[in-house]
Image: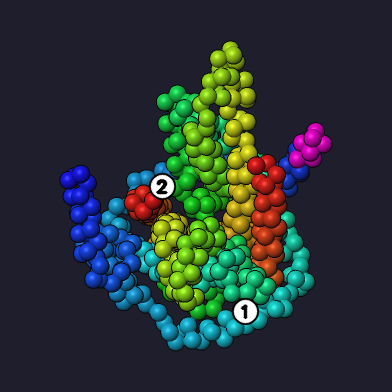
Amino acid sequence: MWVCWLLGVAVFVYCWQRISEATTWFFVWDAPRIANDIWTRATPPRWDYIAQLGRPVWDTLNIATLGTMIALCIAVPVAFMAARNTTPSRLFVRPIALLIIVSTRSINSLIWALLLIAIIGPGVFAGIIAIAIRSVGFCAKLLYEAIEEIDESQVEAITATGASRWQVMTYGIVPQILPAFAGIAVFRWDINIRESTVLGLVGAGGIGLQLQASLNVLAWPQVSLILLVILAAVVLGEWVSAKVRGAII
Amino acid sequence: MTTFAEGTLHTHRELDDMLGQRWRKPRFIKRPWLRWALGIGFIVYMIAAVLTVEVNWARVYEGLDRGAQFVLAFTSPDFTSRGGDIWDGMVESIIMTVAASVVGIAISIPIGLGAARNIAPLPVYLICRGIVAISRALQEIIVAILLVAIFGFGPLAGFLTLSFATIGFLSKLLAEDIEAMDRVQAEAIKASGASWMQWINYGVQPQVMPRLIGLSMYRIDINFRESAILGLVGAGGIGATLNTAFDRYEYDTAAAILILIIVIVMALEYLSGMIRARVQ
């Protein structure tokens, strides 16, 4: 036990040393002055700039919503293929579905955006696809866990009436996972609002583009206004999603 | 007798009403006006959204070639030609993850205690909840931009960003867990005349420890994933290497980095699953 603690402390100290080696400490000691400087430059926010933010906010909302839609369309079949009790083939299809889930989930949407911009060019469309790909794994994982937890007796009852495979699906399985599905959709939409606000930093449309542009020209009053707008959007998204989930459950 | 007969008559009548009709699936949203309003609003929004999204289809079509190249690159990832850069970036990412997780978890425990209403006095509660709210509302990447502007380029900014994000995530969940704990055990310890430290140590900590370990493992996993993008804004880690690889259209190197990220995330997930299974 003590050896474990010792090892842990040693690893941490080593990591800290590596970080400290790579740091220019002069800048760090200077940091309070710089922070103060940025703060005085950034306040007050340039309020009249907000007129130019309408379109980017609308784009951001679209990226999040359309991205979530596309993701759900892909996630549903993937989830059915990944769930142990509905998968067509446990040996071949399930591992593939699980691989899709893991690989899309472990890569951040900013990286997907970066990749898609290299492939299909900058713009809102790249953002939508990036959000969609990132969300597939998340939604499919939660959904397939919900499918695996369904009540088998209902499925059996439907099967016993002589229903076909698709009828079992629509009358036995889908009604049981519909609340979970709606909850997952709204939950992911909330996260996507957050993520789509920063996608513009790499050029994938939305309010992040304005943020990047303002940062590049060091227009700190604009930066602070954009940050406030992003904050408002995030809080609003969370509020809506909490309301909707409260209504479902 | 009569009331019983009336009762059966009543239910019979309802059944009779339903008898001639086909059975219909119960709707997911029961109130019709709400169903229609949501449906129509949704369709209107979708039309507006799709119309305003500008897609340069010619550019997308041109890009498909490159997309195919990239997918092909996954079959022949190139780990060697930029091996040194990849190795340095990965090591830096892992170091940032480890250091930030340790510091973040250490700080988030007192803040989590302070943010639980049933053990903290109101002023402390409000301050801690405020910290949690700020940390949760700001995305990692935005914090990273600000910290890079303040502290300069390098892993220190990334380390601070990840620690800050960890505090918001872990404190909130820890506080919720403490608020949901069993009061009786904590009270029993208090009744034995324990000091505040002893009370926390023997009354509260054993109840939340398994979940705290599980959440910490999960957060390490998230921190590693996030550390992969911090490099995009100059906060250290593999992100800078990845960005360069994309900019130079070196898809095989990019594919190698992505595969490494996926493998490490999978390994972390597997490890955290094992640890969580053991503590619970």
Position above or below: B213 against A133 = above
Q: Is residue B88 left or right of residue A121?
A: right
Q: Is residue B184 left or right of residue B27?
A: right
Position above or below: B34 against A2 = below
Quadrant housing residue B28:
bottom left
Residue A111 place in picture, x, y as percent: 56, 66
The residue singled out by tag 1 in the image is: B70
Q: Is residue B12 left or right of residue A24?
A: left
Position above or below: B66 against A160 = below
Counting every numbered tag in the picture gives: 2
**Viewer-nearest residue: B244 or B175:** B175
The residue singled out by tag 2 in the image is: A41
> What quarter of the picture does the N terminus of chain B occupy?
top left
Residue A28 image label: none
Residue positioned 75% across, 40% down in the render = A8
Distance in Å between CA atoms under marks 1 and 2 = 43 Å
Image mark 1: chain: B
Image: magenta residue range: A1-8
Residue B62 place in picture, x, y as percent: 51, 87
Residue positioned 51% across, 50% down in the render = B143
> What quarter of the picture does the C terminus of chain B occupy?
top right
- The prevailing secondary structure element of the residues shown in magenta is helix
